[in-house]
């Protein structure tokens, strides 16, 4: 079983005003430094327990790849330490370590030896590597003729040919086609079930929330937040939408979950609830039941445009369905301040059994990224049960008609 322990990790690069200053620092020892330090990461600490899956997220330039390089030893930290136990397999930059003039098979042997395999081990594993990569005769062609997707296929196949104690994956998986991405994540899930510790960097919200036990958010080289994947992803999405005069805050709900609220505050959701056709408020819905989502909005400033949207999410926080009044051709314009507006969305709850949450947003145009008045995650929690439907599995209720001809 593998563990990863990161303690006060930091990375800085020397910056010189000119090349002569660099030369002078080399040739004239003992004088004051002629450089300044540019810190790209500071004071990052966390531990990944055996068998745990942790996702790392953040905007481009937040320090995600730098962190993984220091963890795997390809870059030395300026401060702090990294401790890893167990056999490590890492898939960082696409095709890292591949020689373009060697064949895929030759590169597989070289990459495997870098991972600690013997030549005999790789020869024994090679049929499995070829079968998983599915690049056919290209395995004996120079890597320079490979597409980026083919390089990723071979690199992942070699790195995971045998279950590692620790698997570290950067965003290289995003290069592959959808079929191979599913295949990779299936293997990752299998290894996780067998006890592999996973550290993964991805912009794929579904991957982070579907695979990981915990998420870490990096911002400007510092650890901004860590916790449940859903709460961290909600906070990350709010940060992406945050602009001048926007605020982002989190508060604990009655159920103990962290709710993220962001926006300028120019409009707010005063209340929202689900009702049945008898105008009775409900929190438990039957599969396929007609339901009314009633939302009361209060404007606090004059608004050129007001759009209300909602997203239904499953228990992992992955979106099931979402829409808004802009897409429904019912956006409001020139809305005065200090006005109360009621909205009623009517739909069939064609969802599978389970617990769901509902996020609401007030904004302009078709997305809250443009102008976010208020975004509330976990604004409402409800449950779907099956009282009178035949048994089925999944997150959607799509009852078929059946015809059998014999």
Image (spheres, grey):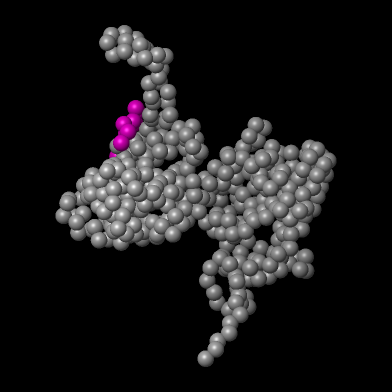
In the rendering, at what x and y percent does residue 126 appear?
A: 24, 57
Q: Is 6 in front, or is 332?
A: 332
Classify residue 336 as left or right of residue 397.
right
In the rendering, at what x and y percent does residue 16 appear?
A: 39, 16
Res. 385 visible in picture: no
Query: Which residue is at the far bottom?
Result: 406
In the rendering, at what x and y percent does residue 406 appear?
A: 52, 91
Image quadrant where residue 99 sits: top left
Vertical comparison of 302 with 164: above or below: above
Classify residue 210 as left or right of residue 257.
left
The count of marks equals 0
Q: Residue at x 74, y 59 (%)?
A: 345
Q: Residue at x 74, y 63 (%)?
A: 346
Classify residue 304 as left or right of residue 109.
right
Classify residue 156 as left or right of residue 127.
right
Q: Is 339 contained in the magenta span?
A: no
Q: Is 371 in front, or is 392?
A: 371
- Which residues are the magenta region? 74-83
Vertical comparison of 249 with 206: above or below: above
Q: Is 80 contained in the magenta span?
A: yes
Image quadrant where residue 101 sits: top left
In the rendering, at what x and y percent does residue 290 appear?
A: 71, 68
Q: Residue at x 60, y 77 (%)?
A: 400
Q: Is 354 in front, or is 34?
A: 34
Q: Is 179 in front, or is 321?
A: 179
Res. 399 visible in picture: yes
């Amino acid at each position: 079983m593998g563990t990863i322990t990161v303690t006060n990790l930091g990375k800085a690069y020397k910056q010189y005003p000119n090349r002569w200053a660099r030369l002078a620092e080399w040739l004239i020892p003992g004088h004051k430094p002629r450089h300044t330090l540019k810190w790209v990461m500071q004071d990052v600490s966390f531990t990944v327990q055996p068998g745990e899956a942790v996702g790392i997220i953040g905007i481009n330039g937040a320090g995600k790849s730098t962190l993984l390089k220091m963890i795997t030893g390809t870059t030395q930290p300026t401060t702090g330490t990294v401790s890893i136990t167990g056999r490590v397999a890492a898939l960082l930059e696409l095709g890292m370590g591949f020689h373009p003039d060697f064949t895929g098979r030759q590169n597989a042997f070289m990459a495997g030896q870098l991972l600690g395999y013997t030549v005999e081990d790789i020869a024994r594993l090679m049929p499995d590597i070829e079968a998983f990569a599915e690049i056919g005769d290209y395995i004996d062609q120079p890597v320079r003729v490979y597409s980026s997707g083919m390089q990723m296929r071979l690199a992942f196949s070699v790195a995971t040919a045998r279950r590692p104690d620790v698997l570290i994956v950067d965003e290289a998986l995003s290069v592959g086609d959808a079929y191979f991405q599913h295949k990779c994540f299936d293997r990752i899930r299998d290894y996780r079930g067998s006890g592999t510790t996973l550290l993964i960097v991805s912009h794929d919200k579904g991957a982070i929330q579907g695979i990981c036990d915990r998420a870490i958010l990096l911002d400007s080289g510092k650890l901004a937040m860590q916790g449940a994947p859903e709460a961290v992803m909600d906070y990350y999405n709010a940060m992406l939408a945050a602009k001048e005069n926007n605020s982002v805050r989190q508060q604990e709900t009655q159920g103990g979950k962290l709710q993220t609220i962001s926006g300028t505050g120019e409009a707010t959701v005063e209340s929202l609830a689900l009702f049945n056709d008898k105008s009775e408020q409900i929190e438990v819905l039957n599969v396929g039941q007609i339901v009314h989502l009633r939302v009361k909005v209060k404007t606090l400033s004059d608004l050129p445009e007001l759009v209300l949207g909602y997203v239904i999410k499953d228990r992992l926080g992955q979106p099931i369905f979402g829409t808004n009044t802009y897409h429904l051709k019912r956006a409001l314009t020139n809305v005065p301040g200090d006005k109360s507006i009621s909205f009623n969305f009517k739909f069939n709850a064609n969802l599978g059994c389970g617990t769901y949450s509902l996020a609401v947003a007030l904004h302009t145009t078709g997305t809250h990224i443009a102008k976010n008045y208020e975004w509330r995650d976990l604004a409402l929690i409800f449950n779907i049960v099956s009282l009178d439907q035949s048994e089925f599995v999944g997150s959607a209720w799509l009852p078929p008609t059946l015809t059998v001809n014999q």
